[in-house]
Image: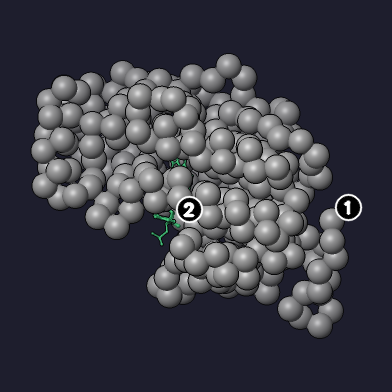
Amino acid sequence: MYRQHQGTSAQETFRMKIGITGANSSVGINLLSHLSKKEGIEMVAGVRSESAFASLPKSASISPAIIAYDNPESLKQALTGADCLIHLAGILIENKHSNYASANVAATDAVVKAAQDCNVGHIIFISVVGAGANSHNAYFRSKGVGEELVLNSGIPATVLRTPILMGPGTAGANSLRSAVSSSQAKVLGGGQYCMRPLDTDDLSQALSKLACTPVTDSQVYELVGPEPIAYRDLIKKAGSLVGKEVEVGSVPILIAKLGAAITSTLKGGGITPTVIDVITMNEFVAENADEKIGINLTPLEDTLRKILIGES
Ligand SMILES: NC(=O)c1ccc[n+]([C@@H]2O[C@H](COP(=O)([O-])OP(=O)(O)OC[C@H]3O[C@@H](n4cnc5c(N)ncnc54)[C@H](OP(=O)(O)O)[C@@H]3O)[C@@H](O)[C@H]2O)c1
């Protein structure tokens, strides 16, 4: 049974309080607007800066909070009274200010400790298909370590491993839009790798279901989109939806990695050989968790229409 919470408006009583980190991420914005349409849910939307704070959707059920992952008090303040924590903060592309150790591991460690101190009843962690604490790939390894921190927290935890995400503001949708903006696209290895693009609306449905279901033990789920598709075919399909025949050419992966190694070292971040390995990995899963979680997946074509043509 979840705790009762008094809402911010006089008449409102929230049945449940959810703390969300990385609330300004593309997934976070989608999730906040999804959850704000549901009755009885109060959200504390954790972000790191004033500008991120200002970017959050406005709703009586959303309380924005500025948090610092190296300031336990700020995390505890945000999570006090939370029934569930959805930890979204995390990166694939490192920069001068954020790397895998800080964004994917230290931030997870900090929120787990705060969740323990605040007696949070359930932690949901967004991970990635391919994550593993012993992976040779630094990104997959950092997400795998994050998973272990959450799963060993003593709090019932749900790890949701996801593939490339498609929705407003996601890196995947932005790349696809750019690929179909002209009649020729050059992609890594000719885009032969297989993807399982997941609609961010479906991810938000899944997070909402998981957060609202009482749990007593921990689970690791892999949730991917309905249709496996090679990236080159995805570009062609997206092209045909916007009335374009897109010719897909190839950037050899080895050459791309060499260029990425040099430029990322000079710039202190950006696309690295690690990122290229992640992007070009085949997204295979043993079992898709859509049925277990109880959601209906959006057909890929409908997802593409939403991100390319703005159809809802
Ligand atoms: N997009 C995908 O295709 C995909 C696929 C699989 C898994 N995921 C996972 O899904 C989650 C959301 O992804 P997204 O693409 O929506 O993210 P996003 O839009 O790129 O946003 C990244 C979030 O992480 C925060 N962040 C960055 N560095 C941080 C640090 N050092 N400490 C704490 N927070 C930090 C950012 O905060 P600031 O704005 O303050 O920097 C922002 O809230 C992430 O955990 C990501 O790994 C995404």
Relative height, residue 289 to residue 123 (above, below): above
Residue type, mark 2 in image: Ala
Q: Which mark is residue 249?
A: none
* Mark 2 CB near ligand 1 (8 Å cut): yes
The quarter holding residue 293 reads top right
Residue type, mark 1 in image: Met
Given residues 111 and 185, the one toward you in this image is 111
Residue most extreme to the bottom: 10
Tell me how many marks there are: 2
Q: Label 1 belongs to which residue? A: 1
Q: Which mark is residue 107?
A: 2
Res 206 visible: no
Element carrying mark 2: helix
Q: Residue at x 50, y 67 (%)?
A: 71
C-beta proximity under 8 Å, tags 2 and 1? no
Given residues 220 and 309, the one toward you in this image is 220
x, y percentage for residue 34?
63, 55
Residue most extreme to the right: 1
The quarter holding residue 62 reads bottom right
Q: Residues within 10 Å of mark 2 (few under 14, many from 20)?
A: many
Q: Residue at x 61, y 58 (%)?
A: 114
Given residues 29 and 106, the one toward you in this image is 106
Mark closer to the chain start, 2 or 1 = 1
Q: Residue at x 77, y 74 (%)?
A: 7
